[in-house]
Image (cartoon, coloured by chain):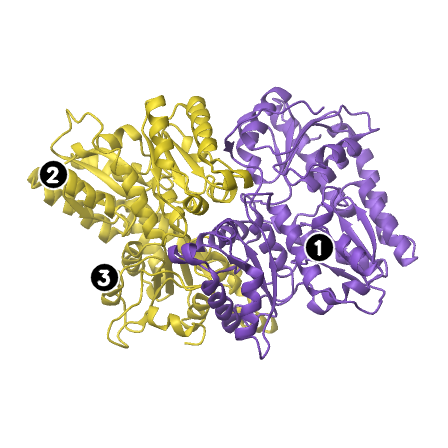
Chain colours: A yellow, B purple
Amino acid sequence: MEAALQERQDSIHRTGEAPFAMECNKDSLAGAVSQRACVFCGSRVVLYPIADALHLVHGPIGCAVYTWDIRGALSSGPELHRLSFSTDMQETDVIFGGEKKLYNALVELIDRHSPKAAFVYSTCIVGIIGDDMQAVCRRVAEEKGIPVLPVQSEGFKGNKREGYKAACNAMRQLVGMGDISGISKYSLNILGDFNLAGEIWLIRDYFTRMGVEVVANITGDGRVGDIQRAHGAALNVVQCSGSTMDLARMMKEDYSIPSLRVSYFGVEDMAESLYAVAAFFKDEEMMRRTRELVKEELSLIMPEIMKYRQALAGKRAAIYVGGAFKAFSLVKAFRTIGMQVVMVGSQTGTPEDYAELAEITDPGTIIVDDSNPLELSAFLQEKEVDIFVGGVKERPIAYKLGVAFCDHNHERKEMLAGFAGMLNFAREVYSSVMSPVWRFVPRKAETVQEEIND
Amino acid sequence: MTKMPPQYVSTTNACKLCKPLGASLAFRGVEGAVPFLHGSQGCATYMRRYIISHFNEPIDIASSSLGEKNAVYGGGANLKLGLKNVTEKYHPALIGIATTCLTETIGDDVKRLLFEYRQEFMQDGGPLLVQVSTPSYSGTHMEGFHAAVRGLVEQLTVAAESNPTVNILPGFLSAADLRSLKEIVADCGLTATVLPDFSETLDGPALRDYPLIPKGGTKISDIRAMGGAKATVEFGHTLPDQLSGGKYLEKSYGVELHRLGMPVGIRETDRFFEVLRSLSGNPMPEKYALARGRLVDSLVDGHKYVFGKRAIVYGEEDLVIGLTSFLAEIGVQPVLCASGGTSGGFVKAIEKAVEGFGVEMPRIHEGMDFYEIGELAAELKPDFFLGHSKGYPLARGLGIPLIRVGFPIHDRVGGQRLLHIGYHGAQQLFDLIANAMIAAKQDGSEVGYSYM
């Protein structure tokens, strides 16, 4: 395809049109205008929602200022995570080293805010000038009596996935520090949900109704104290392909805690996830409660969803998201509302992820890794897409071409997880696709002109 | 006055952005140009996201996407590959290359790398390459913006035949401001080259096809000819000479330079029109004489709503200077003028802007963040904030209005359509401020007045 550079051809697949093969999970091609961010971004998004921790970015101002209050990750209590802290390194710090400034900034901020822990994020130049962040963090931890954790998130050290790993490494040091007495044998940690628009509260409610105790949210509405007790849970439920899988693996190694991969998007995956948890605990009564819960929730949302389905049947959707796990659920969620997915891609999918997408999508569907505006806009046009699902960076691509859009990224203000979230999702899609404004965009201009002439 | 501000080592909620962002915006205002950051992938992506959330427009910023090996052995190969790929896909007329803190720290010699690139890949032509050094550990996005403009002027202009064009280097204005500026100059009977001009590239129409590079922007041939222009008009009281494109043109080609403040409010706009009159020989067009007259009339009509109200103004230094000047003109008491910038010229310019208007000298602080602004706000008891959307948490905390101006506006639509400059801009600002004060009184009253 013409919009893609030669080197990018192997990262684009069309379901059913060739044996499956996919180049992915490698560094972005220089000059290709990737939609990806960096290692720092990966760490920052994962740890960001821990609301009673101090998040200090050690570097020049950009990295901190572009991530200030960036996520819609809500907290039921402290909101320290919504502030943007930086050492704002200046030229002299780069020349003479930034350790002293880091130490002073940490002490100042810990004294001011009394956080339960501090995460210190390394940025590109800190990796280059060689500040000994570990030593500074150790010293401050001793002096202040709280965990002070360095996050090795130098931007250039790989892609976003490396950042997830650095975040998990930092959290690994917290797990195991807390008292785990009194935790139920029916208990779990929620990994990989970030409480966007309050979603984790909904999911916690489901688990509570099933009779399962939630020990730690990792990391939506997260608390340092809960994460320190997380090793007391019987199970980790992990959402999201990359972000917290590493932590689940570490907790399996360190504490033999098994994990289940789940997804809370779309009615099918949501119900399956709850059933899988109930099945894990091998408790008949719990399974019965779960079935009832699913039945009850479905009865609340399906009548309205069917209304939207009628209007949306046969429309075409394109998906481009950060992690591929969300794409699986979205493909199914679109089927629930009668729509067909004709393009699906992600920033950080693995070969297994893409193989699964090739498995569950219709013939001809475009599957793409680490795409860019030129490719995405060409796909939208080629497939005559009715709605594009993505994040802020994808939005103007859709809008410029007069295509509807649904924000499914971390900035969104609408709850899209859980059963209630599926209804919101249907509403979101409906309210963009059915808007009358598309009648005036150039793509549809002739139709309007004909109507006026009639 | 200028008492010492609170001094902290750490920065909380910065009131500034980083240098390469400013450079990217400036490069985006040149016809056929693609901004390109030499650094790791995250910089370009974060800045795109930040800019998109304000303009609601696509902005493709390319990156050399350095990885670990490049950081150790140098980013030259990636820079060249990136330029090659951008050229192949976007067919740009110009690539504006800005460095980042990473590539400055590892010491990539971009000038030499571009020389090599031209030798290796551009024997049969190719885009113009303009490069600017923008390490984010010194200065703010405004220094990056000015550095890119200066870079374009320095690297593109040639000794041109003298022509009647006027160069306008406006600094960082909104898309609506740029449109208004071009209209003003044309109405005065002048031909102007406005650099940069992203009024269309960052605020374009809905399209059938996704443009590789959006239409619009300052024409490269016009930039080349700037050396032969009749005069340069440059906005910005705090712009240092070494970042001034106007100074360069004056020194290299003897182009007469008119340094003005950003034309916000009556006096600064009057000064701008006076320069336009002297350059064109034409009196102020009737359209603007009328707009000025209507503005003054409206200030009279609404003066009581705003008199004595206390304002905190923050943002880029030159915008804050212009806004403060206007606030003084309408009888608002600025109590704090703050910026994350540290040009060194901020305090003096503010003092001059409010002098003689019977207002108390506000506290004026460079290098501030929102934590420090918030601490002062608690004791200064302002009636409103005037600035970009990042002041919202403070305004919300104090329960007073935030009047949104400048960049970024991340929590409302239409940031790119805000008009700040000229008599029309002053009119919009006045209506916004007066109505915010009226609304605050109306909403705060138990009576529920329906006439105000």
User: What residue does disc 3 label?
Assistant: A352
**Nearer-the-camera pick, A109 or A263:** A109
- Which three-letter amino acid code belongs to the residue tagged 3? Glu
Which is more N-terminal, label 3 or label 2? 2
> Image quarter for residue A77?
top left
Q: Residue A163, image x and y in percent? A: 34, 48
Tag 1 near tag 2, CB within 8 Å:
no
Q: Nearer the viewer, mark 1 or mark 2?
A: 1
Chain letter of disc 2 in the image: A
Q: Tell me, yes or no, if residue B212 can be seen here.
A: no
Is the residue marked by circle 3 packed among few (<14), some (14-19), or many (20+) residues within 10 Å? few
User: What residue does disc 1 label?
Assistant: B178
- Which three-letter amino acid code belongs to the residue tagged 2? Met
Q: Secondary structure at mark 1?
A: helix
Q: Secondary structure at mark 2?
A: helix
The label shown at residue A286 is: 2
Left-right relation of B98 to A293: right
Is the residue marked by circle 1 packed among few (<14), some (14-19), or many (20+) residues within 10 Å? many
**Nearer-the-camera pick, B173 or A384:** B173
On-image quarter of the N terminus of chain A: bottom left
Above or below for B311 versus B425: above
Query: Distance between the Cα atoms at labels 1 and 2?
Result: 65 Å
Is the residue marked by circle 2 packed among few (<14), some (14-19), or many (20+) residues within 10 Å? many
> Image quarter for residue A174?
top left
**Nearer-the-camera pick, A68 or A111:** A111
Left-right relation of B163 to A285: right
